[in-house]
Image (spheres, coloured by chain):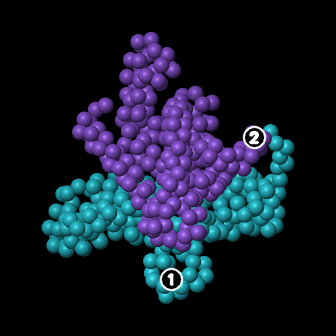
Chain colours: A purple, B cyan
Amino acid sequence: MDAVLKNLPYLLGGFLTNLQLAAFALGGGISLGALVGLGRISKRPWVYYPVTLYVNFLRNIPLILVIFWFFFVMPILVGKTMDPFVSAAVSFVVFEATYFGEIFRAGFQSISKDLVSAAYSTGLTYRQTAAYILVPIAVKRMLPSLITQSIITFQDTSLAYVIGLQEMVRRTTIVDSLEVRSVQLYTFVAILFFVICFVGSRISLHYEEKSRKAKVL
Amino acid sequence: MLAYKFDWGVLWRQPYGEWLLQGLWLTIQLGALAWVIALSLGILFGTLRSVRFWPLRILGALYVEIFRNIPFLVQLFFWFYAGPMLLGKTLQFKINQISGLNYYIAIFGLGLYTASRVAEHVRAGFASIGHGQFDAVLSTGMTRLQMYWYVMIPHALRLIIPPLTTEFLTIFKNSAVAMTIGVAETTFMSYKIDEQTFHGLEATTGAMAIYLVLGMTVVKLMDLIETRFRIPGLMSR
């Protein structure tokens, strides 16, 4: 374990970047995803069709290609070279929102029409109904799927490697090129990701069982 | 806005247009060959999770948990950089001499990773069949092995064709990660065009179109398979 221990602060610093990127990706992706989900059940064609196109398009494209695309397009839009972290964060929000959006859509569609009518009849506007009724119920019902997708998003942050972001995997390749201790270095990275994702998947399972027992809301 | 001159010509001008098509051919190979591994191992480990003998159940669960909870990029790097080292000095030397080693490792790694996802669907398929059928099949005098091979696995597979379609689409998308170990598939080629022409935006946009067309083709193909193998009276679509 000497190569790992010697470079531990450097490697863990990279892991912190993964965590930060995941925080942005999840915060932005889930918020935008809730809006995308609302768009996907919208009765207005000028909302429904563009959102559906956006979702179906991006879900057919590899994330790694989307990361590249934003890395190329951002400097053109902004007018200066882009920090890889910002570029990666934007790609993740735009990309993951389509996956979270489909989870939200499934959640919204599980809500009975009567409940929505009841909300309107109390005088709530569409915006209030969405914010206080639809989204909270969908989050609660879809919690296991949301957690699972969050774990996938966290794993995906390693792909920012390709635009040179100094995250954990990028730093591991750098350390490995100096130390040539591939087995211990990559095992260490794998274990670190495994522990966090495994704990996450147990939490997801816990909520799944809980909602199965409760049957309702 | 920077003054950026679009040059969509990089998508068909030689040799770049040909590069993208070569990349597509490699993407198809990676996805299709890895799918063979993913399906075989996925069925195996998914079935193990439903057997009565608990050590085998644990083995199935262990496989799924390990391969699902580690990012595919990390797995790929592990097989590519650390894998040969695990085999000892002499074998490591021989392995590293294989030409196109990255191509084989990409197929192998992608197959092992996707197998864990397939295994989860297979397990769900078994769970939806119900215990009655197990008892019924055994009462006909079949051995447990025959029961799995002739009845349960075919039944479970026909039930899970829709999620398997999604996995089959995903395997082509995940194959793009193989570019990180130098496999010249579609995404790799679009990046290579950027290095040569600085028109990465056009090249990656072209690559997106390629993945889109590939994805639509796969969906059409799986629709045909689903209609062919649909269980009568069950899937109404």
Q: Which is more toward the observer, A188 or B178?
A: A188
Place of residue A108 in the rendered image (x, y in percent of width and height, measured from the top left): 43, 32
In this rendering, is residue B42 above or below A166? below
Please give left or right for residue A206 compared with residue A107 in the image.
left
Place of residue A206 in the rendered image (x, y in percent of width and height, measured from the top left): 29, 44
Place of residue A121 in the rendered image (x, y in percent of width and height, measured from the top left): 42, 13
Q: Which is more toward the observer, B6 or B164?
A: B6
Disc 2 packing (10 Å; few <14; some 14–19; many ≥20): few
Q: Mark 2 is on which residue type?
A: Leu
In this rendering, is residue A171 above or below A82? below
Q: Which residue is the site of mark 1? A: B92
Subunit of label 1: B
Give the secondary structure at mark 2.
helix
2 and 1 marks on the same chain: no
Give the secondary structure at mark 1.
helix
Subunit of label 2: A
Disc 1 packing (10 Å; few <14; some 14–19; many ≥20): some
Q: Which is more toward the observer, A35 or B130?
A: A35
Which residue occupies 63% across, 30% down? A46
Please tell me in which quadrant of the rendered image residue B47 appears: bottom left
Please give left or right for residue A131 compared with residue A211 in the image.
right
In space, the residues marked 2 and 1 are separated at their CA atoms by 48 Å
Place of residue B230 in the rendered image (x, y in percent of width and height, measured from the top left): 40, 58
> Which corner quadrant holds the N terminus of chain B?
top right
* Foreground: disc 2 or disc 1: 1
Which residue occupies 65% across, 45% down? A87
In this rendering, is residue A153 above or below B76? above
Q: Which residue is the site of mark 2? A: A77
Q: Mark 1 is on which residue type?
A: Gln
In this rendering, is residue A124 above or below A167? above
Please give left or right for residue B34 compared with residue B217 in the image.
left
